[in-house]
Each structure stands twice: as C-alpha cells, then as structure tokens.
Amino acid sequence: VIDLIEVTMLGSPGLGILRDSAEEAVRHRGYLPLRVVVDENRPVVRPIEIVGLDHILALYHSVDHALTGDDLHA
Amino acid sequence: MEVVLPTEWVAPSIARDWVRRWLTAHRWSPAHRQDLVLAISEAVSNSVEHGYGISANDASRFVLDPSLKTIEVYGHVITNRDGVRRVEFTIRDYGRWTPPAALYPRRGHGMMLMRACTDEVIIDHTPDGTTVVLRGRPLPRPPLWPV
C-alpha cells in the first residue's frame, strides 16, 4: 500500500515509480496488486488521471479502505 | 519573472516555488496555478535529465561550470484588450538533448503532463540547447475589488 495523502506534488518521476511498482507487484505470483491511497488532493489526483494511471492502479480513499475494502473502481 | 537555476535535481523544486509565488501574486486561480507549476516542473526536469544528462538516480551530481550551464525560466503575463490574461513561460537550457528513449525506453509522462496542463507546448532543440515555451490557458480578468 502506498499512501499519497500527504503528498503535495506528483510529477513524472513519481508517476514512473508508481507504474513500475504496480507492474512489479503484478509480475510476482502470490503478491497482491499495489494499492494506492489518494484523497481529493488535486495536485496528486490530476497527474495520475492525465497519464491514465487511474486505470492501472487500485485507488483507495484511506489506508483503512486499502487494507480492507473495495477500491474506487468497484 | 526571471530565474536562473543550477543544473542539479534541486532545480525543479526551486522553479516550482518561484512559479507558485509569482502566479499567486498575479492572482492566478489555484487550479490553473497547479497545472502551470506542474508543467514547468516537468520542463525543468527534462532540462536536467535530457539536456544535461543527469540521471534521476544521480541526485548528487551537478555541472562543474555553473556560469555556462544553467537553466533559465522566464515568465510573463499577456493581457488581451478584453482583459483576458494568459501567462507564457520560457524554459531554456544549454545542454545537449538526449532523447528520452535512449535513457528510459518506457518514460514519456513529462510531455503528456505539459500538454495537458497548458494550451500549447513549443519545443526547439538546437545543438546549443533546448528552449521550451509553455502557453497557459486563458484566465478571465479578476475583479478589481473583492466581491
């Protein structure tokens, strides 16, 4: 689980790490998909949407939801 | 606005602070401001990484001759006759452009972010460096007094 709630700025290096980490998790059998916690924080949500990572990442609104609940696509 | 940045990985962060403060002083709306800060940050990152060839994993390296190798950021506000304002930024470096594919075959988020966050992105590569012009989206004229 990656918690981005306190993050104030997300650019291409951070997006690259998120994508690489998500793909890394998928490659390992037995690993759960990478879960990413975001709230309504526009400087973080917008870059994720621009590059289309919102379709790849399992997004949650809180760490609790990431650990227990359904993601935002559900 | 005119800032000269060192060619190190601290440059994007310095540029973000300057642009954020400058646009706030010019009463740019938060959403427009955030988009422009991100676009400029990406352009400056490109100059560090692809202009001067400093790897993202190599945060400590910097160019030894700071008088020659800098990244310059200029910004100015253009006001139309009808009061609609837009901002134009120019980011200039004096490095040798290394195509992103040569460094990271799977990157390319930077261009996508710059295009999405501005009206227009113009990139001019020459043997002496790269100039990027970022044209912001138009912003209606702010009220002359608080309403």
Image (cartoon, rainbow, N blue to C red):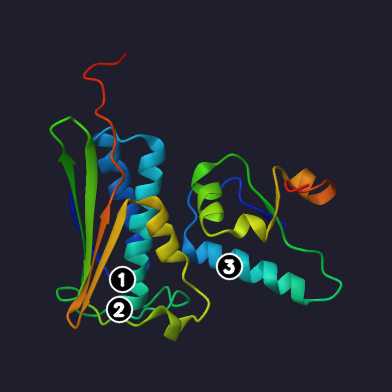
Picture residue at 24% right of the left edge, 42% below the top = B86
Direction from residue A9 to residue B80 in the image, left or right: left
Residue at the front extreme of this rendering: B82
Mark 1 to mark 2: distance in Å?
6 Å
The residue singled out by tag 3 in the image is A17
Residue A19 in the image: above or below residue B94:
above
Mark 1 to mark 3: distance in Å?
20 Å
Picture residue at 37% right of the left edge, 41% below the top = B32
Question: Mark 2 is on which residue type?
Answer: Tyr
- Percent position (x, y) of residue B16? 34, 52
Mark 2 to mark 3: distance in Å?
22 Å
The residue singled out by tag 2 in the image is B52
Q: Can you tell which mark lies on residue B47?
A: 1
Question: Who is closer to the viewer here, B62 or A35?
Answer: A35
Question: Mark 3 is on which residue type?
Answer: Ile
Direction from residue A38 to residue B15 in the image, left or right: left
Question: Mark 1 is on which residue type?
Answer: Ser
Kindly state the secondary structure of the residue where label 1 is placed.
helix
